[in-house]
Amino acid sequence: MLALLRTRRWIGFTTLVLVSIVAFGLLSRWQWHRANEKQAQRIELEQAATANPVELTALVAPASDWQIISTTGTYDSSTQVVVRQRPQDGRNGFWVLTPLMLADARSVWVVRGWLPASSSATTSPVIPEPPSEPVAIIGSWHGFEQINEASRTGLPAKMVGAVDPSVLPLTGDFAGYLRITATAPSQEVLAFVSAPQIDDTMNLSYAGQWLLFAGVALVGWYVFLRREAKEDARDTPPV
């Protein structure tokens, strides 16, 4: 077998197998890191969901993403908009984004819920009116998005491409927005925006598969080498 390994053909084949094994190992490592990142995100989301709400006006530091926030105020329906391309449950739709005016005269943007698209996603839907009376809400906090420049213009009135203050009718007084999970009085027309389902098991499975491919490559290399060595030994006449 050592003589075979010195041939140009087997040097090339061995090099290819070694490069493949290294590549499979790097891909497995990347999937492992992605699984760890997703696991951390899932734990953070689960812990945030079970934490006691913090009153928005009582915050002494900026809220972190997914932190549960409570507040009260009155909606300003004159400046509400919809955010396009927000699929949910396999359907395309919009987020209904309405500013909530707080008792201290500040305002915060609130995603009141999800509205399915009934026609073209570039046609503004009829936005359900919010309650006219004061509301108490609980929701998860999220930092503002950054809009894709291609979505900055060309949209119908009262439609935006992202929750980006640069395209919203009002800037708001907070560096982020609330996504409602509970409200009083209750709402019936809009569905609450679903929380993401973070699954890290698929990445762990991929990590194991790449290691399996590396093992197959190594075993295959040895099997081919051993078989060719046996064939050479059989075809070589005895001295």
Image: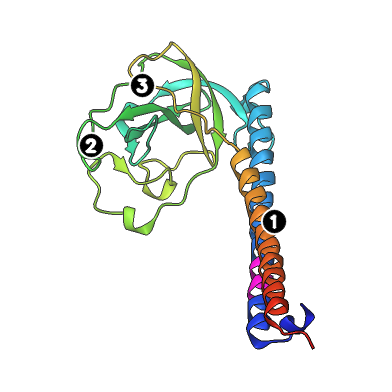
Q: Quadrant of the N terminus?
A: bottom right
Residue 203 occupies which quadrant of the picture? top right
Residue that carries the numbered disc 1 in the rendered image: 29
The amino acid marked with disc number 2 is: Ser
SS at badge 1: helix
**Label 1 CA crowd tier, 10 Å (few <14, some 14–19, many 20+):** some
Q: Position of residue 110 (x, y in %)?
A: 45, 30
Residue that carries the numbered disc 2 in the rendered image: 124
Residue 61 occupies which quadrant of the picture? top right
Q: Is residue 62 magenta?
A: no
> Circles 2 and 3: CB distance less than 8 Å?
no
Who comes first in sequence, dot 1 or dot 3?
1
Q: Which residues are magenta?
A: 16-20
Task: Give the residue displayed 40% in from the left and 45% down from the top.
Answer: 162
Residue that carries the numbered disc 3 in the rendered image: 190
**Label 2 CA crowd tier, 10 Å (few <14, some 14–19, many 20+):** many
Q: Is residue 86 visible?
A: yes
Left or right position of 179 against 27: left
